Image: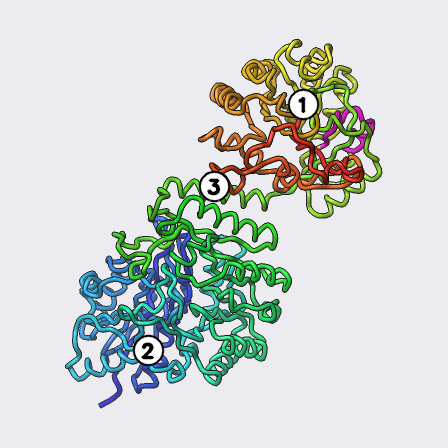
Amino acid sequence: MGAAKILIVHPSVSVARDYIDYPYFTDLGAVQLASVLSGEGFDVTLVDAYALPGSGLREREDGRLLMGAELPEILAQSEGDFDAIVVAYTPFHRPPHRDDVLSETLAGLRAQHPEARLLLADLYQSGQHYVEAPGEQVLAAYPEAHAYVKYEAELTLPALLRGMKDGDAPRGVQIGERPPQLDALPPPAWASIDLDAHDTFLERVVRNLGRGPWAFPVDGRTLPMVTSRGCPYRCIHCSSNPDRAPGEAKTQRRLGEEALRAQLGLLSELGVTRVEVLDELLNVSERHFDYFLDQVEAFDLRFDVPNGLRADYLELRHLERMRGRVNMVSVSAESGSERVLDEVVDKRMDLTRIREAAEHAKDAGVPLMIHFMIGLPGETAKEINQTLEFALELWDEHGAWPAVQYATPLPGTRLAEGRTLPVVQDWGPAFQKVPEAAGSVAPAQLELFMNTFQQRLRQSMGPKKLIMNVTYICNNHCTFCAVGTRTQVDGHPERQREFLDKYRQHGVTMVDFDGGEPTLNPELIPLIKHARRIGYERINVTTNGRLAVYEGFAKKLVRSGLTTLLFSVHGPNKRIHSSQVGVPEAFEQTVKGIENCLGFAPRGVELGMNITLTKGNFRSLGDVAQLAYDLGLRWLNVQFLTPFGRATKLHAPDTAEAAAVTREVIDAWKERMKVQVINLPWCFLPGYDAHLEGDLGKLTRHMIFVNNETVNLANYLAERREKKEVCEGCPHACFCGGFYNLEDAPEPEWLVTPESLVREVESEMQVR
């Protein structure tokens, strides 16, 4: 009697465009099984839907993506006589309900081979999320299958297939036995598939997905491997060791050094240039990790570890060895709260080790991604903010990319205990992207935390802006002026040009010219023209507009190359405006200057109005908005007082009252012109986030002062801001600087020393 003929099919999968995990490497289990069965004496044919001429990534009518080959091509490669067919069952077939791609594959194979026994098998290899589902439900969803083998299958399937040939194999659900040691398994049978077609498949996936640069790229000949199975840690959300009995300790089994070297050597012989190591935890054993690094160096292989490394086993020397071989290293912090990490996640991780990993990665020049979750059981809003603040701190200080996701319980994990879970229908928009109620923070509130974090992150990556104070001289005498106590001098034009050149060479394309009153510096227009000539794309000037009362100057100013011009107006009429700026004739001159500039402004130059709210003018904000609109302006900047220079509590209105007036103005005018609010804690205008986002831009703004020194705007303003108890659980806390301290207090000592007096500047939005 000849050897039993076995067909192994790795089917195509259907995924959401924004899927989670690595479905383009799920064929590893089928390729591993092919080598095992061949070694056991079976006559094996492997049909890998990822390694056929037509394999790729295609859009489906329902918006999902088909990853792999079309069914007719799979069936064409499956012709012949077979005693049994093993079909790989992946998490992306969304157990336990009947998946359309898998069901069509099984139906096609059953029709093509009516006499062959057909089995479903997880072919679990470690490294991808495992969706625990009752085996009986899986079989009920796929009546075409004779049996279903759960978990690891290398010991169970050979015996099951022999029994089928002898006619006495049991039906139903079979629990796979764990291999006694990984070294006993032969290497995956990659030579049995068309590797050129597999390369083309991965290239098509990268190209057709359209995500831009990937965190874990597919380049050259890229294949997956595992050097270990399982993980000894008990993190609440993890689905590793899915076959573990209740109360059984989690373990990890690793390839020995000889087997590890042999597998990497075989991959190298096959022309592999990058290895995707799918281990759940590659570096838990220092000796194992060091030996792995030795071997990838010996075979000159690049690699990535998509599931990440344990931060407390990751040393600077490891990162230095990985430089140039990995595209990115990832570690998991899960939370920025030590209580949540210890009592909820059960991570057994000191957050200082996460910080050290970020520092070491920066020192080694290796990109680092750090994973976090929000929405964990029992987690408070305050602890969510601790997580977001920690994530952003490591990003700002060390460039460690913060991957923040919602905590999504997978069936079978401790995170899922006691919770009624929907069937995992979609690994993209749902998994880790849709919040669930798990504690004191409702899903809608979790979304607000996430949106806030993402806004803050986008702003920190956004285009940087240079704000240049060209003078401290001013022809107004505003009672609230933030720079009114500074020496009335102009900046040095040659040094200012040098700074424009320097920042442009570093990629900055936006500049604001500010003061004092910038139009009083005769070098302003030459500076604007220089900025335009060297490539600045957005150039703003903030002015009181009085000099523009002269038509010749107004024409030169608006046609100098600037793109926006913001006029400071602090009252709707002469009486109120003059009482704020200290000059009786200022109102008429400013209004006439606005009219002149509007008349001469070329297409594409945006003009707007700026007001700082004080006790004397905040109730007139609606009339100021009307004035701006009547003049032809379609942009109003509303600034709340910041306690610098002459501005003190004496000049500041009640913040809540002023915010209420501002809300009314926004409601009345938001459909007719752009209204932005600056320097106001977000909690005073709930639901008006779009009008408050201008404050976020301060994160990437650098100020050049009259004496040519610089400071970051957000850091400067933070000197007079404070967080209060109410801020601890606020979903805007990660980018809101808190409340301004408007008490009459001296400036911080570092601001009033002679050498630093002119080093700091008021916000670029603060009025003269």
- 419 relative position to 303: left or right: left
Q: Distance between the residues labelled 1 and 2?
A: 82 Å
Q: Mark 2 points at which residue?
A: 45
- 653 relative position to 223: left or right: right
- Where is residue 380? Give x, y as percent: 40, 46
Q: How crowded is mark 1: few (under 14 residues within 10 Å), some or many (20 or more)?
A: many
Indicate whether residue 737 is drawn in magenta.
Answer: no
Give the residue drawn at x 63%, y 64%. 364
Indicate whether residue 521 is drawn in magenta.
Answer: yes
- Which-is-in-front pick, marks 1 and 2? 1
184 to 328, vertically: above or below: below
- Where is residue 273? Give x, y as percent: 54, 72
The boundaries of the magenta stretch are 513-528
Q: How crowded is mark 2: few (under 14 residues within 10 Å), some or many (20 or more)?
A: many
Q: What residue type is labelled 1?
A: Phe
- Where is residue 706? Give x, y as percent: 78, 35
- 58 relative position to 733: left or right: left
Give the residue drawn at x 55%, y 59%. 368
Q: Name the residue under label 1.
A: 480
Q: Name the residue under label 3.
A: 728
